Image (tube, rainbow, N blue to C red):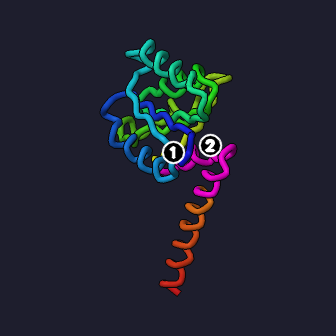
Amino acid sequence: MSQSLVVILMGSKADEVHCQKIAEAAKGFGLEVALRVGSAHKTPEHVLALLRSYEADPRPKVYITVAGRSNALSGFTDGSVTAPVIACPPPSDAFGGADVYSSLRMPSGIAPALVLEPGNAALLAAKILALSDPALRARVAQFQLKQAEKITQDDQTLG
C-alpha cells in the first residue's frame, strides 16, 4: 500500500480508544500507523526523542496528536517537526467543552490543524499524504465516491 506514515501521539493511555478510531480509519486508506504515548507536560524529553526518531525517517508523514484539557501536545509537536500536525482531542464534557479552546489558539508560528472527528482526522491525513501519492489519492477519491453514493441511495429510499 502506501509508504506514508501516520504517527498518532496520545497524551496518555486514557486516550487509546479515541486513537484506535483514528488508526482504524487511517489503515482503511492503506496508511501505516504508529501509536505512541507521551506528554508535553510530564515527559517532554520522551516526546522530543520520539519526534526526532520519526523526523529522521524519510517517509512522508503526518502527526495526529490526541490530548485533552490543556492541549500542549499539539503545539509542542508542531513546533518540533516539519511535517503537518493534526490535533484531534478526545471528546470531553469537562468544563462545558471549553477545554477544546486550548486546541484552537496557538502561538504565532505554530499551526496544527484541528479536527474533532477521529475518522475525519484520518481523512485529512490521507488527503495531505495523497498530494504526493497517486495511489493514495485514488483511495481517497474512492472513499469520497462511496460517501456520495450512500447519500444518493438514502435519498432514493425516501423518494
Q: Provide the residue span drawn in magenta.
A: 119-139
Above or below, 62 relative to 122: above
Q: Is residue 35 left or right of residue 141?
A: left
Q: Secondary structure at mark 1?
A: loop
Where residue 133 appears, as percent x and y from the top left, is 65, 46
Residue 66 lies, in percent from the top left, at: 44, 34
Residue 56 in magenta stretch = no
Q: Position of residue 36 (x, y in %)?
A: 40, 29
Which residue occupies 53% across, 37% down? 5
Q: CA distance from mark 1 to mark 2?
A: 9 Å
Q: Which residue is mark 2?
A: 129
Q: Is residue 7 above or below residue 41?
A: below
Residue 42's disc is none
Residue 117 appears in the rendering: no
Q: Residue furthest top?
A: 45
Look at label 2 and name its amino acid.
Answer: Leu
> Residue 138 or 7: which is nearer the viewer?
138
Horizontal placement of 83 versus 12: left or right? right
Residue shown at the point (59%, 37%) measured from the top left:
113
Picture residue at 54% right of the left edge, 67% below the top: 146
Q: Which residue is mark 1?
A: 31
Tell me where residue 80 appears, x and y as whole percent: 58, 19
Q: Is residue 126 magenta?
A: yes
User: Which residue is painted at 55% across and 37% down in the image?
Assistant: 86
Left or right relative to 23: residue 129: right
How many numbered marks does the figure carry?
2
Q: Earlier in the sequence, mark 1 or mark 2?
A: 1
Residue that sits furthest to the bottom in the current view: 159
Amino acid tagged 1: Leu
Q: Are marks 1 and 2 in contact (CB under 8 Å)?
A: yes
